[in-house]
Amino acid sequence: MHAAVVHSFDELPRYDVREAPVARTPDEVVVDVLAAGLHPRVRSGADGTHYTSDGTLPMVPGVDGVGRTPEGDLVYFVASDDAPGTMAEQALVDRRRAITLPVDADPVTVAAAMNPGMSSWVALRRRVDLQPGGSVLVLGATGNAGQLAVQIARHLGASRVIGAGRDAQRLDLVASLGADEVVSLDGDGVADRLGRVAGDVDVVVDYLWGQPTEQAMKAVLMARTDRSRPLAWVQIGSMAGSEIALPSFLLRAANLSILGSGQGSVTTAGIVAELPALAALVASDELTIDALPVPLAEVERAWTTPTRPGQRLVLVP
Ligand SMILES: NC(=O)c1ccc[n+]([C@@H]2O[C@H](COP(=O)([O-])OP(=O)(O)OC[C@H]3O[C@@H](n4cnc5c(N)ncnc54)[C@H](OP(=O)(O)O)[C@@H]3O)[C@@H](O)[C@H]2O)c1
């Protein structure tokens, strides 16, 4: 079969030939892949920098996808950690990590949105107790996951959603997706702006970390009307840095909980249990999803094609 293959972490994946996978257990099935998203997690796996990377080459990138089972079912699946990647004509699927999609679901849309959508969906459903009427700040709202987080927070009952990002034009887009307020993280006065608009939020969904988080955490905590009001700060991505400096007084001066959401902090079973509801939402018309399909044979072009903000490349075998 054909697949995208990484031969060296310094080079782009190439369209190449690999042996088709074979089911190893009764739980596994080989599916025909219809679409696989090119997520940041896929890029970091393909260049060897993801924290789960064990350096084994050659490797097929791809962590999830939409496929057709031998029985003809349309499924969304998350690849097992020890299975080849999903950017191939065929992929090995553990049925316990797959869900059946509505027959009319668009494979490209589902492949584009499930991974970025899951980041906030799982965080808000499994890691924090978002009460109906609660408020959410999305830090890094201009990316794919951030734009979906704004929409998903609203869908899950937040009454106030604030999007923060560094690009003014892209923030306009976030506002058009339903954010009540947007805050620019660019230029002077960021702390004042954030404190004014987001001082009393209940949950922060953080895709940035690094310097913007250091600044935002202090700004939000210092601006709280009631510092004993719980604030759950959920670490999800690290687009702006992998570390922060955290002054100890912030933990004493306000009712702050810092936690993360991702593979490990939520069990695989917990993540899979959330997939059907998210897939139903993705397959409905409620979310704005911008997917750009590219043939698998053009994988090198896909890797280097610039995308619009919020647009997700999807490889189509
Ligand atoms: N934990 C999980 O479950 C999970 C699941 C999915 C994704 N993630 C993570 O979530 C993060 C975002 O994923 P994505 O799919 O949304 O990626 P994406 O579509 O590439 O978007 C990344 C966004 O980060 C912004 N950004 C980068 N550096 C920044 C900085 N220094 N200051 C402010 N904004 C900055 C970019 O802003 P500009 O538009 O200004 O460039 C862009 O909007 C990634 O780290 C990904 O690995 C985590």
Image (cartoon, rainbow, N blue to C red):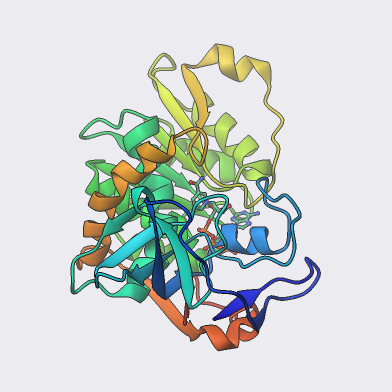
Q: Is residue 233 above or below residue 44?
A: above
Depicted 31 relative to depicted 187: above or below: below
Q: Position of residue 166 (x, y in %)?
A: 57, 58
Residue 187 falls left or right of residue 263: right
Q: Residue drawn at (40%, 31%), measured in percent from left and top?
A: 127
Q: Residue at x 52, y 67 (%)?
A: 21
**Picture coordinates of residue 144 (x, y %)?**
46, 62
Is residue 105 in sight in this rendering? yes
Residue 25: % across, % down: 43, 51
Residue in the foreground of this view, choosing between 87 and 292: 87
Give above or below for 73 relative to 228: below
What residue do we see at 36% from left, 37% from top?
270
Residue at point 49% right, 65% down?
22
Q: Position of residue 236 (x, y in %)?
A: 52, 43
**Residue 311, can we see it?**
no
| Foreground residue among 151 and 250 | 151
Q: Is residue 246 left or right of residue 31?
A: right
Quarter containing the N terminus: bottom right
Residue 254, placed above or below residue 78:
above
Regarding ligand 1, which quadrant of the image does it lie in?
A: bottom right
274 or 80: nearer the eye? Answer: 80
